[in-house]
Image (tube, rainbow, N blue to C red):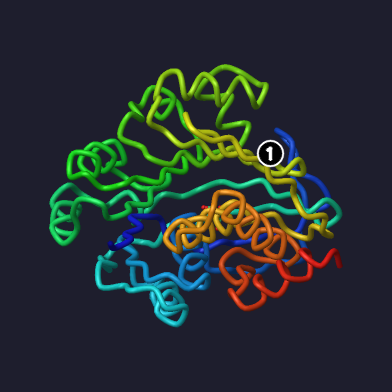
């Protein structure tokens, strides 16, 4: 069984501000940082740091070579990562430290140059039972969802960032849907977490839904099982990549055959470490640290 993440790679440009800019306003920032990021890259790095072999496919420009290097150093197989002449995707984040919150704009660039021919070439090396990890930051997403499902791949889909076309996308080929409450509300129209999972399972009875609830933790729901995981209290410095860390560690736990309670606990613990650090990929912890933290929590420390 192989894991393929067909996903985005971004250069995250982060500007510290006192508050988010309002229409017509100009604000000053005196602190700037540049981080490796992109939901796809972050998730691959999280899975690799959690200890599972993962392939990352996607497109960067020459300015994104350091992203490829970071993937390799983190243990991700980059043979399906392509460089073309375009600009690498960018995320422009404004953040204010007090609440660890950020607001983002996303410049798609090379992430939107994954054509069908390239996708077909990559997928040729994968097959039934393999896991395909997807988010909504690359081109040809509906094609990937359709083709992966037709090949019998098990798809873990994170519908983020949400957009209008995604609300109408057929998700019947998705095995695991990993989403937050806002995305759940956009897809189902419901705001209550129980109602969100109920509507999703009515429409897609085969689906396993993992709904993250911010400070309230996360809930897993399938036709057979319902598991709740509270979140671990932490001093949040930067929430960027928290969801991606959760996704990567969740994949690792699934591959290792952990129970759903164990999988959610591991993912929630990893993600709590990520929010206590600044940046995207650089804030994702190694497995040894996460295991140690889980042991401490088990002992009640
Ligand atoms: O999920 C966090 C990521 O979303 C950031 O790294 C940024 O690149 C955006 O894509």
Compare residues 297 and 122 and report the one nearer the observer: 297
- Give the quadrant of ligand 1: bottom right
Question: Quadrant of the image for the N terminus?
Answer: bottom left
- Where on the picture, by quarter, is residue 238? bottom right
Is the CB of mark 1 within 8 Å of ligand 1? no
Whether residue 61 is situated above or below residue 261 in the rendered picture? below
Q: Position of residue 109 (x, y in %)?
A: 37, 53
- Where on the picture, by quarter, is residue 141? top left
The answer to whether any part of residue 136 appears in the image is no
Question: Quadrant of the image for the C terminus?
Answer: bottom right
Whether residue 121 is situated above or below residue 70 in the rendered picture? above
Residue at (48% x, 73% y) in the render: 51
Q: Residues within 10 Å of mark 1 (few under 14, many from 20)?
A: some
Residue at (60% x, 72% y) in the render: 282
- Does residue 103 appear to the left or right of 220 in the view shown? right
Residue ID for mark 1? 213
Q: Secondary structure at mark 1?
A: loop
Q: Position of residue 11 (x, y in %)?
A: 50, 64
Residue at (71% x, 66% y) in the render: 294
Whether residue 103 is situated above or below residue 273 in the rendered picture? above
Count of numbered circles on the image: 1
Compare residues 168 and 203 and report the one nearer the observer: 203
Compare residues 86 and 249 and report the one nearer the observer: 249
Whether residue 179 is situated above or below residue 94 in the rendered picture? above
The answer to whether any part of residue 280 appears in the image is yes
Q: Position of residue 127 (x, y in %)?
A: 18, 54
């Amino acid at each position: 069984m192989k894991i393929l993440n067909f996903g985005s790679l971004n250069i995250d440009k982060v500007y510290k501000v006192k508050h988010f800019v309002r229409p017509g306003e100009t604000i000053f920032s005196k602190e700037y940082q540049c981080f490796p990021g992109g939901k796809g890259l972050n998730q691959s790095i999280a899975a690799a740091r959690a200890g599972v072999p993962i392939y990352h496919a996607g497109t960067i420009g020459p300015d994104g070579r350091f992203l490829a290097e970071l993937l390799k150093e983190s243990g991700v197989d980059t043979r399906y990562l392509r460089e073309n002449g375009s600009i690498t995707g960018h995320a422009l984040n404004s953040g204010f430290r007090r609440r660890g919150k950020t607001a983002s704009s996303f410049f798609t660039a090379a992430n939107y140059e994954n054509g069908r021919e390239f996708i077909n070439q990559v997928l040729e090396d994968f097959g039934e039972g393999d896991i395909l990890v997807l988010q909504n930051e690359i081109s040809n997403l509906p094609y990937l969802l359709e083709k992966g499902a037709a090949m019998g791949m098990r798809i873990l889909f994170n519908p983020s960032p949400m957009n209008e076309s995604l609300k109408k996308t057929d998700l019947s080929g998705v095995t695991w849907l990993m989403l937050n409450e806002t995305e759940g509300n956009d897809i189902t129209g419901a705001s209550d977490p129980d109602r969100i999972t109920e509507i999703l399972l009515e429409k897609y009875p085969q689906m396993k839904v993992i709904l993250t609830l911010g400070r309230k933790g996360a809930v897993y729901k399938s036709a057979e099982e319902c598991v709740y995981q509270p979140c671990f209290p932490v001093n949040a410095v930067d929430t960027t990549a928290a969801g991606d860390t959760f996704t990567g560690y969740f994949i690792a736990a699934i591959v290792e055959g952990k129970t759903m309670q164990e999988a959610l606990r591991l993912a929630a613990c990893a993600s709590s470490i990520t929010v206590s650090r600044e940046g995207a990929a650089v804030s994702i912890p190694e497995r040894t640290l996460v295991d140690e933290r889980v042991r401490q929590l088990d002992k009640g420390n």
